[in-house]
Image: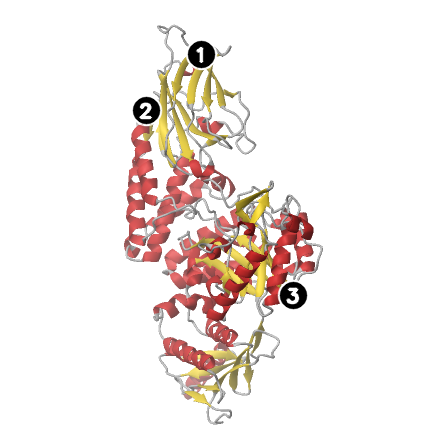
Amino acid sequence: MFQKYLYLFIFFSILNSCGQDKNEFPFYSTEKKIIPRISIPLNADNQTTLAASEFVKNFKLVTQETLIVERSNSLNQNFTYVILSVNPTQKDNYCIYKKDKDIVIQGSSNENLRYAIEEFFKKFTLLSFPEKINQSLQDEFQKEIMIPNELSICSTPDFEYREPYFSPNFDAEFRIWNKTNYLELEWGLWGHNIPKLIKGAQLPETIFAEVDDERNEEQFCFTSNDLFEFLNGKIKDIHENDLALKKFMILPNDNEMVCTCSSCKAVGNTLNDASPAVFTFMNKLAKNNPTLSFFTAAYNSVKEVPKFKASENLGIFYSTINIQKGIPIERTKYFEKFESDIKKWKNYVNNVYVWDYAVNFDNYLGLYPSLRVNQDNLKLYKKLGVNGVFMHGSEYNYSALQDMKATVIANLLWDTSINLDVEINNYFTSKYPPKLADILTNYYLFIESSFYTSKKELGIYSGINKSVSKYLDPKVFFSFYKEFDTHTQNNKYDKDYLKLATAFTFLKLEIMRDAGFSEYGFATLNGNDEIIVKNEIGTLLDKLLIYSKSADIKTYNEVKYTIEDYINSWKQTIFRYHKRKHYFYKKSFKVLSKKDEDYQNIKVLNDGTFGLRDYNTNWHLSSTDNLILEIEKSSISKAKKITFSFLQDKKHKIYYPSFIEIVDMNNKLLKKLIVPANEDILNTKEISIDLPTDYDKFPLPEYFKIVIKRADVSGKNALACDEVIFN
């Protein structure tokens, strides 16, 4: 019997020894009564003391244990320590390593020390960011923390400046956990904000650009001494009021105007390039403020590298706005020029930052899964020597999955080689219950792969039809939505869940709007050519209203179109469409007028889709010609009238038409409807014109034309028409 128990004891001893990793040691253990202390230098400043407090706070959250902090230059050999210190001379931003039985956490600055502390808890404990913010663990408190015996980690970011410009990054806790920058804390002047500084100042008109021999207040003269003296003084005041504000952006106004006064031409300005004057201006600022940094952007009027030397404290932002198409830059036709431009600017200034983009600004509730594309591009930027990236997200507005995107992009900006699948999975599992996390992870990874492998371009201003074509398979999304929706009851008070529910419901409606009368569309067309709107649309609109109000989401794109208006527009449209005849649906016709380069697809005019206030979705735009259609009478023989939908968006120079004519093939007028001018800034409206009958003086011939005349307004203007319905 004794021998039997001896064998069992040996067996379980072997199992126990196999279960322990001999390459690790217990840094903290309640069972073994191992509790470390924290050591900071005797002369530690307030910031180092705060860092120690942060370690204590995190540790208590993870273990319920309150650690003792010792301020001393020597260690008590009876205890194990976490030694926190700042070493400005060290090569790496931070290091975490084992020294005898102690752990040393050291940063090159207090900020990097804070980064290192958070990294320690990410790597060696179960603490996640949501738990840290909520001060509550999902699981039980840790009773043991194991640390590798051969611990030696040092880290330096791939980019010196790292900013994912989403609202989560505005939170200080997020920035420390994810090691990011925030423009409000570093930039004394950002973007196109010189006009705000000079507002109300009594300055001469010579501060403005001379364009076509006249002063133009829409642009600046960067060789103006008055402009320099004023801005130089403002910059000094801004910095003295907040010494942390050390970066200043000197951007011309957001247009392509260039000053060609004699002094600007003398420094090198041409009709199309203001770079010489802008860099002359920045060189003067740099000389007067040697401890500050000054940046402009290779954008609009700033094009070429000047021929004179730039000061050491100057930099450039290179905007990818015209080349960010949802495809890695190295795989596009833009690569060669981009590479050449970055190298030229890198040879000219010490700091080259890229201004990049991570959302679809026309639809913040769209998913735009570009993280793999972003990763490839970031690797390219690093290879080319770029040392800062500003990743433009949805700013203060909510965008779908913004917390996840901000987190993953932050990690990419520190280390471009991270495993995206792991990062995305880690985010969802730390944020949501297991089954919901699996659903979100699996679907998001699927669309990331679809987006990345597709060769189709998808710019940062794109309608839903292009998103569907590139990555948003309706069948897959509808299946995902159905599964996601099963979790609503259990999460109806979770604001983060409701934000996702808002975005996904909005996206489903957009897909259905774009799909028209097809399987995944908002309506069907019965055998009598009658439109039947699906009952599901009403349910989805009600859900969108409830979710958006509960989640406090009011707008859905950059120009702040409201969800309330979106819902109302839908309701008005389906009320008009339901049981309306559509004899022209997908019938053949010709466009006789000249088509715009980006609007060659004429099917949108009778494919059953409809446009709302966003001109990128389901609208056919004509900006170079009137819209002239050729129709065959036999294809619409049952119709009594034509109903058109038009958009007016004055900001984008889109106007309602001035008149609509029905003419024969010899241009003889059969019917005419004059459209009165309208003051709508942004709106849509339907206009109907009766078809000529056999009883009219000029009946409808077998072939006829519809002429839709663009508005009689000066300057550039466009006509937007979506569905042409014969009913």
Among numbered discs 1 and 3, the one appearing first in the sequence: 3
Residue tagged by mark 2?
580
Residue sitting at 48 percent across and 48 percent down?
447
Find out whether the residues at labels 2 and 3 contact each other: C-beta distance under 8 Å: no
In which image quadrant can residue 167 be found? bottom left
Q: Locate the C terminus by quadrant.
A: top left
Q: Is tag 2's residue or tag 1's residue first in the polypeptide sequence?
A: 2
Residue 618 at x, y = what percent?
A: 44, 33
Left/right placement of residue 445 relative to residue 641 reads: right
- The correct choice, above or below, for 465 with respect to 74 in the image is above
Which of pointers 2 and 1 indicates the residue nearer the eye?
Answer: 1
Q: CA distance from mark 1 to mark 3?
A: 70 Å
Q: How far apart are the two marked residues, 2 and 3, measured between alpha carbons?
A: 68 Å
Say if residue 338 shows up in the picture: no
Residue closest to the eye, 574 or 427: 574
| Distance in Å between CA atoms under marks 2 and 1 | 28 Å
User: What kind of residue is marked 2?
Assistant: Arg
Q: Residue flagged by tag 3: what amino acid is it?
A: Glu
Foreground mark, 2 or 3, reads: 3
Rendered location of residue 557, percent (x, y) = 42, 46
Q: Which residue is mark 1?
A: 669
- The secondary structure type at the circle numbered 1 is strand
Say which element carries label 3: loop
613 and 464: which is toward the camera: 613
Q: Which residue is pictured at 32% across the width and 49% down the height?
A: 548
Q: Residues within 10 Å of mark 3 (few under 14, many from 20)?
A: some
Per the image, label 2 sits on a secondary structure element best described as loop
Q: Which residue bears the numbered disc 3? A: 312
Q: Residues within 10 Å of mark 1 (few under 14, many from 20)?
A: few
Q: Amino acid at mark 1?
A: Leu
**How is the rendered protein coloured?**
secondary structure
